[in-house]
Image (tube, rainbow, N blue to C red):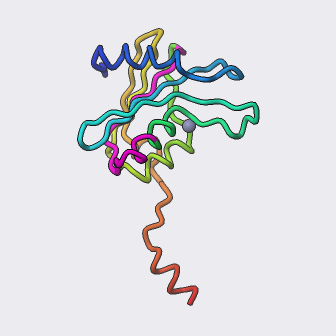
Amino acid sequence: MTVIPGNLASRLKELLSKSYSPYSRFPVSAIVVDEDGKEYTGVNIENSSYGLTVCAERVAIFKAVSEGARKIKRVYVASTPEEPAPPCGACLQVLAEFADGDAEIILYSTTSGKTLKYRLNELMPLRFKFNNIEHYYNKLS
Ligand SMILES: [Zn+2]
């Protein structure tokens, strides 16, 4: 069974209180760890215009990138259901921009303590990457 360090578990639980989720009442927190071991936190932030809501994972990833991080090694995601919630597809795609397939995604339930560990490759085996940009531009000209 996967176990996350006690200090991280308590930080994730404390972070949930900062979630702005008045509509779904589904608080989520995330901690992203970059290749240097630096940590960045995030919570879900909802909006009256639902489509503008941003997940905790993306908030944490954007904070990391805006502070100079370019390689994410691990993401912790915490939620309250007994079965911990996984990231949505949009967050996995955003993560794929800054993480290799072996990046760890660790899901944690703050109520049951259940912890599940996955690799990005497992949760999103086929990721869109704009790798061959020259190839596409050459076809256009
Ligand atoms: Zn998401």
Q: Check if residue 78 falls in the magenta segment.
A: yes
Seen in the image, is 75 located left or right of residue 138?
A: left
Observer-nearest residue: 2 or 26?
26
At x 37% / y 13%, what residue is drawn? 10
Does 34 appear above or below 15? below
Position in image of residue 40 (x %, y %): 38, 34
Ligand 1 shown in quarter: top right
The N terminus, quarter of image:
top left
At x 47% / y 74%, what residue is drawn? 133
Seen in the image, is 105 located left or right of residue 51?
A: left
At x 57% / y 20%, what residue is drawn? 27
Does 128 appear above or below 48? below
Q: Check if residue 74 falls in the magenta segment.
A: yes
Position in image of residue 101 (x %, y %): 36, 49
Position in image of residue 93 (x %, y %): 50, 49
Residue 119 occupies quadrant: top left
Observer-nearest residue: 43 or 132?
43
Residue range in magenta is: 63-81
